[in-house]
Image: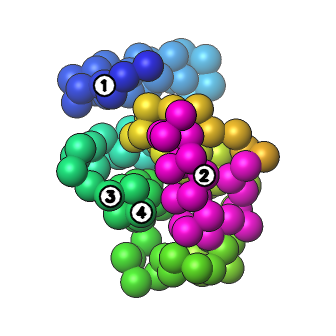
């Protein structure tokens, strides 16, 4: 699965909005639309010349709306930014899309640090 364009993101968001409105009402629509756009923010960091750690940090900063100084490379994501399980799943999906590879929730958890995530991604990119 490759990167998707801004137009495709809007089409997906519109589809999710229409389906949620039809089946769940306004409250569910707002939640689903926010989640769709949130996970799609990874596209803002799709530079090929970025090093792995910088790209990971940018994906997390954009996805989770945190300040760059809040993410510390050597501290677990849960400890430095209070990442919960749902946010971790969203982060894994965004990282998979940003790097074009499959990541396992068993390999990358909310207890992983940016350095550990970088090691994991770099090992997969070398294969």
Residue with the mark numbered 4: 53
Tag of residue 16: none
Residue with the mark numbered 1: 4
Q: Rounded to the nearest whole Å, what is the CA distance between mark 2 and mark 4? A: 11 Å
Q: Rounded to the nearest whole Å, what is the CA distance between mark 4 and mark 1? A: 22 Å
Q: Is residue 124 at all visible to an observer of this figure?
A: yes
Which is more N-terminal, label 4 or label 2? 4
Q: Rounded to the nearest whole Å, what is the CA distance between mark 3 and mark 2? A: 14 Å
Mark 1, other Cα within 10 Å: few <14 / some 14–19 / many ≥20: few
Which is more N-terminal, label 2 or label 3? 3
Give above or below for 37 relative to 82. Answer: above
Q: State yes or no: discs 1 and 2 in contact (Cβ < 8 Å).
A: no
- Residue drawn at 23 percent across, 44 percent down: 48
Please provide percent x and percent y for residue 100: 44, 32
Q: State yes or no: discs 3 and 2 in contact (Cβ < 8 Å).
A: no
Say which of 101 and 40 sits in front.
101
Say which of 80 and 107 sits in front.
107
- Residue drawn at 62 percent across, 64 percent down: 116
Say which of 107 and 26 sits in front.
107
Please provide percent x and percent y for residue 26: 52, 34
Which is more N-terminal, label 2 or label 1? 1
Residue with the mark numbered 3: 51
Stretch of the chain drawn in magenta? 107-127
Mark 2, other Cα within 10 Å: few <14 / some 14–19 / many ≥20: some
Q: State yes or no: discs 4 and 1 in contact (Cβ < 8 Å).
A: no
């Amino acid at each position: 699965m490759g990167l998707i364009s801004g137009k495709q993101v809007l089409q997906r968001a519109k589809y999710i909005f229409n389906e949620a409105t039809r089946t769940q009402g306004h409250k569910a629509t707002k939640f689903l639309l926010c989640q769709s756009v949130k996970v799609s923010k990874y596209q803002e960091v799709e530079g090929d010349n970025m090093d792995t750690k910088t790209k990971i940090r940018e994906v997390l900063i954009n996805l989770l709306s945190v300040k760059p100084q809040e993410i510390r490379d050597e501290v677990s994501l849960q400890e430095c930014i209070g990442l919960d399980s749902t946010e971790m799943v969203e982060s894994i999906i965004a990282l998979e899309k940003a790097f074009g590879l499959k990541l396992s929730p068993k390999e990358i958890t909310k207890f992983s640090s940016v350095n550990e995530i970088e090691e994991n991604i770099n090992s997969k990119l070398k294969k």
